[in-house]
Image (cartoon, coloured by chain):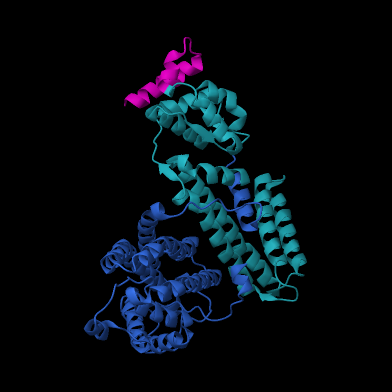
Amino acid sequence: MKACSGFLKKAASQCIISSSVKTEALELIEHSHDVIVSFIHDSLKSYLESKGIKELGNRDGKIIADFFAEQKAQLMKLHYKRSNIQNEILGAVENYVASQLHSLEDGKKLSISIFLPALAAELAIVKHNMEAPFKGGIRCEEIQPNDSIISAVVISTIMRNDKDAVHLASSLQCQFRRNKWVIFVTTDQKDILNREAELREIFLQCSRPEWALDYQREITKNKAPLEHVQDIKIYTSKQNQILDAIKKAVTT
Amino acid sequence: MISLSNEKSSDNLELIRRSIPLPQRFEYDEDTINKTFKDYKTAIIETVNENLSLLDELPPLKTLNIEDVKKYLGKMVEDDLKQDSIFEKSVEIERYTNNMWKYIESYFREIFECHDSIRKQLNSEIFDVCRMFFNSDLPMLFLTTIEDAILIQKDYLDMYDKQIRKECLELLRSRNNRKKFEKLCDAHNRWIKPFTERMDKLEHTRIKLFWYTDFNNSATVDEIFKVKSIRSGALDMKIIQGFIDDLRKQFKEIETLIAPKMAFSLFTSYEKNIGARSIRKIMELANVPEG
């Protein structure tokens, strides 16, 4: 995300967030925040109360460690095998609680009725700051990608994630509607950047934030998207499919 | 940690304090000053009355007699305001805003510091609602809606400070041009008007939700604002939902107004902030496609 911050510092005015990216990002931030707060509110609070623990200091990490060990053991029993996602979520919450506990001053003890809500209060501000770029920091554009473009993206790139397919289709539709090259900026190596060649074949350039401006400089040396595709003599089957879909979307 | 470092064990005292920021007035003539200038005492009486009027807007309380609450709340608000340094400062600032021509330096010397104090107070109010939520069986939406309503007030202060920093230079440059100075004050008041009205409405709805929840979980007036167990069974959840819906609607409206004026804020550094890193980690996990 350091790369993302650096890139946005330089190029925020040139960036657009599609409505689908905005919606997904805000939903994910909210969901993740709620997962952590619910866990602290329900499980951790009940555990501390059941053990009669009324206050915590930075030397009481073992109490919290025991709680998380117990939670993980229960999770394993429940699923009979290691549930990676649940375990990792638990790990992220554990990490947060442990760091905040260790950040308390030496010798200072806090009542759990202060410590737990303070964790949630801190997280509310973090969540708000994470939402900020999606809520006004960067220009958002309402794009409803045509179904045929989404299908063409899924088939051409074997995209497993439906939401990613919508984001990529939004970029393609925006690119051809405005007849201006778009660079799809992402840090998602596994699902998107690893398919760079397939995406380029269907006329969408993706890039890590570090290289986005270099790609933009390079791609804008070409003719504008509509003129560029007209100059191509022979299309591949994937290109045919995406161009048919785009034609439908742009003309409707 | 903001809340942990200012260890708080006091009550959850959520009140209407002052509409901040206030409109700037170029200069009031003598009569108008006598008519509208509010000294500290008058400001307290007005604010107490504003709180009591808000109480009248609450849906009927289940356990407490409204007249007892009024008496108790009036006294409590008055005592609290007398000890509230931010309130005192806001009265002083209002004096400056009423005569920008004369007090421009004083206004800009005090306003930013006052806003910083208000930000701290808002942080403390976030903690209050978290503490109420942690002592309750209320839904998550109760917590997040109030948090959002408080945090947008902080955004507004940020945006306001940014705007008046720009205006400050223009006002100072126009010190020798009364007409231009007056026009600048008018322009300022024009852009803040839609915000002030909405921010006040949002704050009132948020406080009503808090009061409704707190008062209906108090057996006697002495228990109001005290830290206690909150049970949703003591509340009409349809009323709570109505408040939440109102608050979300008002919040969205303000968010849309503020967004174009917000400075671009960088992504929170996930490397340094442990809370952001944890949220980010869970976001990545939640984003793994099924199957």
Point out residue A49 in the picture as x, y percentages from the top left corner.
Answer: 66, 72
Question: Which chain is the one coloured blue?
Answer: B
Point out residue A161 in the picture as x, y percentages from the top left corner.
Answer: 54, 35
Q: Nearer the viewer, residue A173 or A219?
A: A219
Q: Is residue A112 above or below residue A44?
A: below
Farthest-out residue, top: A233
Decide if residue A252 is on the left or right side of residue A1.
Answer: left
Q: Is residue B259 above or below residue B9?
A: above
For the stretch drawn in magenta, the main secondary structure is helix
Residue B286 shows in the view: no
Q: Which of B199 and B53 is in front in this view?
A: B199
Residue A246 shows in the view: yes
Q: Which residue is drawn at the image coordinates 75% and 66% (left, top)?
A: A61
Q: Which of A28 and A135 is in front in this view?
A: A135
Q: How many circles with numbers are drawn on the protein? A: 0
Q: Which of B127 and A77 is in front in this view?
A: B127
- The stretch drawn in magenta includes residue B67: no
Question: Which chain is the one coloured cyan?
Answer: A
Q: Quadrant of residue B22?
A: bottom left
Q: In this view, does A246 lie above or below B58?
A: above
Point out residue B270 in the picture as x, y percentages from the top left corner.
Answer: 63, 51
Farthest-out residue, front: B176
Q: In which quarter of the image is residue B107?
A: bottom left
Q: Which residue is drawn at the image coordinates 56% and 26% (left, top)?
A: A158
- The stretch drawn in magenta includes residue A250: yes
Q: In which quarter of the image is the C terminus of chain A?
A: top left
Decide if residue B41 is on the left or right side of residue A118.
Answer: left
Q: In this view, does B217 lie above or below B222?
A: above
Decide if residue B271 is on the left or right side of residue B226.
Answer: right
> Start and end of the magenta stretch?
A226-252
